Image (cartoon, rainbow, N blue to C red):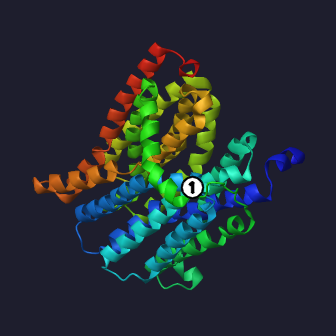
């Protein structure tokens, strides 16, 4: 058994996977939990919750748009140069240092906090493009799936461990010699930045990047948009794939919006902060085993197809139930349900896509699939913020306007579900795409 593990894990692949352990702390502690919490209670103190929700939603949308515009350029630079580690280092420093600087942002200065959050999120999302591309430098094709899964698993574990520590520190600040919970949360931001930097060291010191003979960044920049347009023209010839990608973009936008905006929503309803934090920790630790279970139960194309239908129905229910919830107990139930299906819908979507694309062109099509995934969280937060502001303008109180904003997320699962059903119908009618 140990010999088999050693065949798949070496020093370089483990060092690469540890970067997922490093930067996932930002996704859990900052994006999902403490930034929305502190943004409402500290940096936007005294401001109507509808306004804070709108501002946070617009910021997340802005990040999505920036990544959407830059991902093709960064991706092509990554493919056509030997500068992956250098660009990853830049993004890592950008993200981790911006996160640490949140410690120094004073009460009421919401704009500076939001600006640093946007910069840090760009470092996180942009860095993942170069991190993903380094997989080919640390593993052979036969080991891609295993090493990639190792990174995901370490990410869940590392992000969950630091989140658990920071939650404990925020609930028991006196044990750490910290005056109050607010100061503890500020130290949590510092811990994420330091954790991110510390556990990135193995990748930068051990991983050896494969040299690219072209190594021409300027040419990569010029060709990036041409390459994306060329791939899109190819995909248009495969209707089931095109329809599925549209469906995926819609419903995964809804999924990611719920992850990023759920804490803000709970705060807007005046739910207990400690309960909200614990609920997010529950989601984190349920998510990984649930994703594995979905992978075991949903075997083959038919299993993945039906599994996606099931998770979309659950998410539609989540968005409706979320708009109606009243208590911390209901929020815990919601968090548990999300944990059960969050990893599942991502894993099943990827496996279904792998089933319907031409096998000999998997790299090309998955490149576009991953780019679509990076475009998520553009429309969802924007819709939540805009809906809340509009409903308040038409006379609703702040709580009802906020509930209306959350309910609007259901539109992504309805539209995504309809488009997905259309993709399945066309795929069944046209037969196995891989035989084309």
Query: Residue visible at 16% across and 53% down?
Result: 390
Compared across the picture, whether 67 is left or right of 55 comes to right
Q: Quadrant of residue 274?
A: bottom left
Residue marked by disc 1: 78
Is residue 394 something that shows in the picture?
yes
Q: Residues within 10 Å of mark 1 (few under 14, many from 20)?
A: many
Q: Quadrant of residue 303?
A: top right
In the depicted structure, whether residue 160 falls above or below residue 377? below
Q: Quadrant of residue 202?
A: bottom right
**Residue 314 image position (x, y, % from top left):** 43, 36
**Residue 405 image position (x, y, % from top left):** 26, 50
Query: Residue visible at 55% across and 21% down?
Result: 302
Compared across the picture, whether 43 is left or right of 191 comes to left
116 or 335: nearer the eye?
A: 116
In the depicted structure, whether residue 304 falls above or below residue 346? above
The quarter in which the N terminus is drawn is: top right
The quarter in which the C terminus is drawn is: top right
Q: SS class of the residue under badge 1?
A: helix
């Amino acid at each position: 058994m140990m010999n088999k593990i050693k065949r798949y894990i070496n020093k370089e692949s483990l060092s690469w996977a540890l970067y997922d352990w490093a930067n996932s702390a930002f996704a859990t502690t900052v994006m999902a939990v403490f930034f929305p919490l502190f943004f409402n209670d500290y940096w936007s103190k005294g401001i109507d919750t509808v306004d804070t929700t709108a501002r946070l939603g617009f910021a997340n949308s802005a990040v999505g748009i920036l990544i959407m515009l830059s991902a093709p350029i960064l991706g092509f630079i990554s493919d056509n140069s030997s500068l992956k580690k250098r660009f990853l280092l830049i993004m890592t420093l950008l993200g981790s240092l911006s996160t640490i600087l949140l410690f120094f942002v004073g009460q009421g200065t919401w704009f500076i906090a939001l600006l640093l959050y946007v910069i840090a999120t760009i470092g996180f999302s942009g860095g993942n493009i170069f991190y993903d591309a380094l997989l080919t430098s640390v593993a052979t094709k036969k080991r891609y799936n295993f090493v990639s899964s190792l990174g995901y698993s370490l990410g869940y574990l590392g992000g969950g461990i630091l989140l658990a520590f920071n939650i404990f520190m925020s609930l028991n600040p006196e044990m750490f010699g910290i005056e109050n919970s607010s100061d503890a949360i500020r130290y949590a931001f510092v811990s994420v930045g330091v954790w991110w930097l510390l556990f990135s060291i193995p990748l930068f010191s051990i991983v050896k990047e494969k040299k690219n003979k072209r190594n021409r960044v300027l040419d990569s920049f010029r060709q990036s948009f041409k390459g994306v347009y060329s791939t899109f023209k190819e995909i248009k010839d495969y209707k089931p794939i095109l329809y599925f990608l549209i469906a995926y973009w819609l419903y995964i936008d809804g999924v990611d919006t719920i992850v990023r905006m759920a804490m803000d929503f709970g705060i807007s309803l005046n739910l207990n902060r400690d309960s909200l934090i614990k609920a997010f920790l529950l989601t984190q630790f349920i998510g990984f085993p649930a994703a594995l279970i979905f992978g075991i139960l949903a075997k083959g194309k038919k299993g993945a197809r039906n599994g996606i239908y099931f998770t979309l129905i659950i998410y539609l229910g989540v968005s409706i139930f979320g708009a109606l919830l009243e208590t911390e107990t209901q929020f815990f139930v919601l968090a548990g349900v999300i944990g059960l299906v969050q990893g599942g819908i991502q894993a099943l979507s990827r496996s279904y896509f792998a089933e319907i694309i031409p096998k000999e062109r998997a790299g090309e099509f998955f490149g576009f699939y991953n780019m679509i995934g990076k475009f998520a969280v553009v429309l969802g937060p924007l819709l939540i913020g805009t809906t809340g502001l509009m409903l308040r303008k038409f006379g609703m109180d702040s709580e009802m306007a906020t509930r209306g904003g959350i309910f609007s997320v259901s539109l992504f699962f309805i539209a995504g579900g309809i488009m997905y059903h259309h993709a399945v119908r066309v795929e069944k009618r046209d037969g196995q795409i891989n035989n084309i």
